[in-house]
Amino acid sequence: MKLQDLPLEFKEALPLLERIKTAGFEAYFVGGSVRDVLLGRPIHDVDIATSSYPEETKAIFEHTVDVGIDHGTVLVLENGHSYEMTTFRTEDVYVDYRRPSSVTFVRSLKEDLKRRDFTVNAFALDENSQVIDLFDGLTDLENKLLRAVGEASERFHEDALRILRGIRFSASLDFDIETKTLLAMQECAPLLEKISVERCFIEFDKLLMAPHWSKGIQALIATKAYAYLPDLQETVGYWQAFLNKIDNSYVFQSSEQAWVAVLLILNHENPKGFLKKWKTSTQFQTRVSHMVAAFNSRLEGGLTKRLVYQYGLDLIREVEALRQAVGLTADFDRLDQLDAALLIHDKHDIVVNGGMLLSELDLKPGPQLGQMLSAIEMAIVDGNLANDRETIMLFAKQYLSLMTKSS
Ligand code: ATP
Ligand code: MG
């Protein structure tokens, strides 16, 4: 099959293929970008596979960066773009069902395509726009089917991450998983325990963020793959609830929001502890646990200025959107009004600080000062106190006399 209209990204990269050919080697576009062009989707990275070995590739191009030379990958910088150029390779020795313990460079395109995970990820495209399809991936594309290259169970034994990749591709492409491939996923799912948590997180996160995540969750249920992922061992039943409770056409707006949905449906009590097991960054853990807390406060206390102040407009917007996705009421207009009515958005916006209070009121630093500052902050947030120096000082004096009286 010949591609009629080459997208700009490939056209721009054609001279690279030509240069490698002139040097006496083979080179092709490969991987996800070829699949996406065939599906009429926008493409991101253009990956190139070549018969030249890394040292040979580096000799052909002026500007290269060693990004993964052990795996045969050289980054080539050319007219403002960068391209990953990877030597044809097989991955033949697997230890522990993880990554290959050694990579063998080969000169044959076929060997390289054979080690790829799914037929629709195993196309190559040559400089004449000819699609090379050794595993009948074009038929699978047409039928929207995800099928392992070769013997599925063998391929998942080699690298169990492919199970999760398959589930997330079904979600991002809206493809069904071919029966034998699905059965092999089921059979090999326990091997996921041996895969690094970080790699699992990347795939699970992409699954949640995919437009057809519900298809991925169905595959997750069918394969029981969840049972071999961090802290999800006991979650049978919850994934059906995930499908039932969240509008299946909803597209999550951020990773944080997607993981909040997971935590809420699982009814997990310790978001940070859960995300720690997934080895996520502390920043991510903090943002997700804030959003869970905000979601719960919103449930109990409604939409208030304090809520918007405490968590910020952007975060509460995501909470509202998630509420809508689970069939609760959402009020974006009111949210904007509350935010616009806030006199401060941060305690540093207050025109009076601790030092000023200490000197004007002749106080000593201590817990009393902290309490007074938060009383001032909340009174301003609630709209009961103007953010001006005189009014705040007056408020502080009254506050102080009340405190002294009551102690
Ligand atoms: P995306 O659009 O999400 O980037 P992609 O297909 O480009 O999807 P990548 O993870 O970028 O996926 O990998 C590029 C290509 O490398 C894949 O299309 C596939 O051919 C091959 N590949 C990646 N990971 C594996 C793996 N674990 N096993 C086999 N082949 C893989
Ligand atoms: Mg890619």
Image: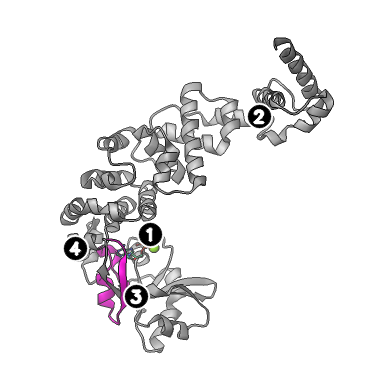
Give the residue pinned by disc 1. 41
- Quadrant in which the C terminus appears: top right
Q: Do the residues labelled 3 and 4 touch (CB within 8 Å)?
A: no
Residue 122 vertical position relative to residue 199 in the rendered view, above or below: below
Q: Mark 4 — residue?
A: 154
Q: In this view, does 21 lie above or below 1?
A: below
Question: Could you tell me which residue is drawn at 50 percent across and 31 percent down?
Answer: 294
Q: Quadrant of residue 354?
A: top right
Of labels 2 and 3, the one closer to you: 2
Q: Name the residue under label 3.
A: 129
Residue labelled with disc 2: 342
Dot 4: what SS? helix
Q: Whole-percent x and y of residue 53?
A: 38, 82
For the residues labelled 2 and 4, the Cα–Cα distance comes to 60 Å
Q: Residue at point 26% right, 70% down? A: 93
Which numbered disc, 2 or 1, marks the residue closer to the eye?
A: 2
Q: Is residue 197 left or right of residue 395?
A: left
Magenta stretch, residue numbers? 97-125
Label 3 sits on what residue type? Ser
Of label 1 and label 3, which has the lower sequence position? Answer: 1
Disc 2/disc 3 C-alpha distance (Å): 58 Å
N-terminal of the pair, mark 3 or mark 4, is 3
Q: Is 16 within the magenta? A: no
